[in-house]
Image (tube, helix red, strand yellow):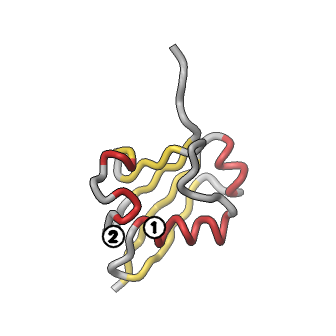
């Protein structure tokens, strides 16, 4: 069985990745760390990176207790964006 995860790149990361979004097909049992390794290999974007926010299914990576060891499920969405600041 395979797991399909949509990855969306925002702002400057879209330019670095060369696309706004794409779908990665991962083996069942994959964790977020497996996906970030593929993104680094295929798109040259190293993760984790203090200048990139990682949001999985609407929650920041720090809100997931297993962080990069969080299991992936079919239909997940990963959002990568530069940190937001302002006031």
Neighbour class for label 1 at 10 Å: few (<14), some, many (≥20)?
some
Specify the label residue 25 is tagged with: none
User: Disc 1 marks which residue?
Assistant: 33
Residue 81 higher or lower than 26, as above or below: above
Residue 28 higher or lower than 12, as above or below: below
x then y, percent, for residue 19: 66, 56
Q: Residue furthest top?
A: 87
x then y, percent, for residue 63: 31, 46
Q: Quadrant of residue 41?
A: bottom right
Q: Secondary structure at mark 1?
A: helix
Labels 1 and 2 touching (C-beta < 8 A): no
x then y, percent, for residue 59: 34, 45
Q: Is residue 14 left or right of residue 52?
A: right
At 36% across and 46% down in the image, what residue appears? 62
At 56% across and 57% down in the image, what residue appears? 47
Q: Quadrant of the N terminus?
A: bottom left
Nearest the eye: 70 or 73: 70
Q: Secondary structure at mark 2?
A: loop
x then y, percent, for residue 79: 48, 50
Specify the label residue 74 is tagged with: 2
Nearest the eye: 44 or 19: 44
> Real-space Cα distance between discs 1 and 2?
16 Å
Q: Is residue 14 left or right of residue 7?
A: right
């Amino acid at each position: 069985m395979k797991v399909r995860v949509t990855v969306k790149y925002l702002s400057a990361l879209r330019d670095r990745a060369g696309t706004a979004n794409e779908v990665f097909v991962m083996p069942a049992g994959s964790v977020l760390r497996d996906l970030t390794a593929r993104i680094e290999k295929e798109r040259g974007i190293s993760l984790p990176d203090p200048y990139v926010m990682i949001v999985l299914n609407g929650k920041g990576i720090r809100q997931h207790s297993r962080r990069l060891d969080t299991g992936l499920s079919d239909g997940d969405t990963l959002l990568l964006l530069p940190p937001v600041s302002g006031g």
